[in-house]
Image: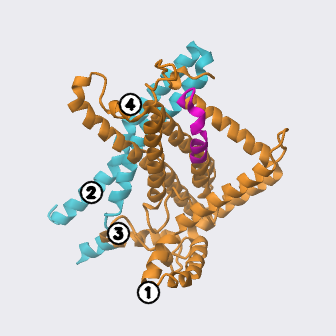
Amino acid sequence: MSALIWVLAFLLAAQPVQAVSAVPDAGEPAATVEMEEHADADHGHGASMPWHDQHTVFNRVCLLLRDASLPAFGAFGMSPEQAEEIANSVFQPFVVMTWIICGGLMVLSLYVRKRLGRVPQKDIAGFVEMCVDSLRGFTRGAIGPGGEEHAPFIASLFVFITLSNWAGLIPGLISPTGVSEGDFLLGLNTTLSLALVAIIYVHYVAIRKAGLKSYLLHFVGEPWWLFPVNIPIHIVGEVARPVSLAFRLFGNIGGEDKVLHFLAIIMFLSAVPLHVPMTFFAVFTGLLQAYVFTALTCSYIAGFLEHQGDAHGNDTHAGPATAQA
Amino acid sequence: MEAFGQAQWYFAILALGTALAVPIAALPACISQGRAAAAAFESIARQPSVSGDIRANLIISLALIESIVIYALLVFFLLQGRLPSLQQIIEAAAG
């Protein structure tokens, strides 16, 4: 328990240093960098500085990886400029961060799989089993009685988004779903990808489980003769869903990352520890936004599977309202 | 204000719009979130056994209402990138 408190104290103390050290290749503190960024107002949103010009610790690691991978591109017969361009976009910090999170989760899963037994273990394997159990119950409750088969996807989505949101609070790492100092709309890459994956999964499950006819009839609303009105409305609604998922996740996590960034600078300049309560709040909203993303995906699945009949030809109203506890 | 040309008016109104984006969105959002929470509390008090169900729906509704304010925050950040810096304003006023 005291180790946890030490870890927390380290995280909170290191945040001001991290916020100030996120500078471009010059070396001034980030406070004046903020003012200089607005000098490039004609470039678009703030300073769109390429990531390889920013020298934070994490960016330097990504630069190392990129430089190590450049010889490999030569095997494909590309020119050095092409290779550098491709490597610049492959080894971006948030992509590398996504790899780290996914790799860490895979290693954890393999370790837990090895430790599965009759009795729950007392270490992190038992904790992971508990999480999997509760996520499976959550999926069953959110989608309905047949919802357990979607639990692997939903659970992975939830865990990945939670860890991505929390990664920005660790000094030295960034949130793939948040903002960064150079490219403001950085997290929109990750959140838009996640939203597209979730929506494609929803539509795939809808067509596969409920059938193409039921899927198409979903776009035609309740009174079938209103279909010239209903079809465009439903199509626009379907397009709005991944967009809103992406912007909601990015706006929440990016906004609080930015607030934490400024509060940490204030802490560095004037020793007012306002970033401490904000960090706790950021932990909570990271979990909450992952929950909202996942619950909305589940409700979209349930919305498509609503009028799916079961084997006897009855109309089982699979949905959150009829879920057992 | 004789010194206000076209550009100054544009940037002045842009700055005002940037600052007013989030507050104007946040006001009705807070009112509706309060109403949603009040309805949830009342129904939990009326029937405590479904409090888990109601809590799940409440969280989702609050997040959906809040996402509108987040869109306004995004508009703020997008507009903030197009505002001139203090340096540029001082130079423009001097020159």
Picture quarter with the C terminus of chain A: top right
Which element carries disc 3, helix, strand or loop? helix
Chain coloured orange: A
Q: Are marks 3 and 1 in contact (CB under 8 Å)?
A: no
The mark found on residue B86 in the picture is 3
Which element carries disc 1, helix, strand or loop? loop
Q: Please, which chain is the residue tagged with disc 3 on?
A: B
Could you tell me which residue is drawn at 78 percent across and 48 percent down? A124
Residue A106 horizontal side relative to residue A26, left or right: right
Using a 10 Å C-alpha cutoff, classify the residue at mark 2 as few (fewer than 14 neighbours), some (14 to 19) or many (20 or more): some
- Pick the residue in front: A312 or A56: A312
Q: Mark 2 — residue?
A: B14
**Chain B shade:** cyan
Label 3 – label 1 distance at C-alpha: 43 Å
Q: Mark 1: which amino acid?
A: Ser
Q: Please, which chain is the residue tagged with disc 1 on?
A: A
Say whether residue B91 is magenta: no
Whether residue B53 can be seen here = yes
The mark found on residue A79 in the picture is 1
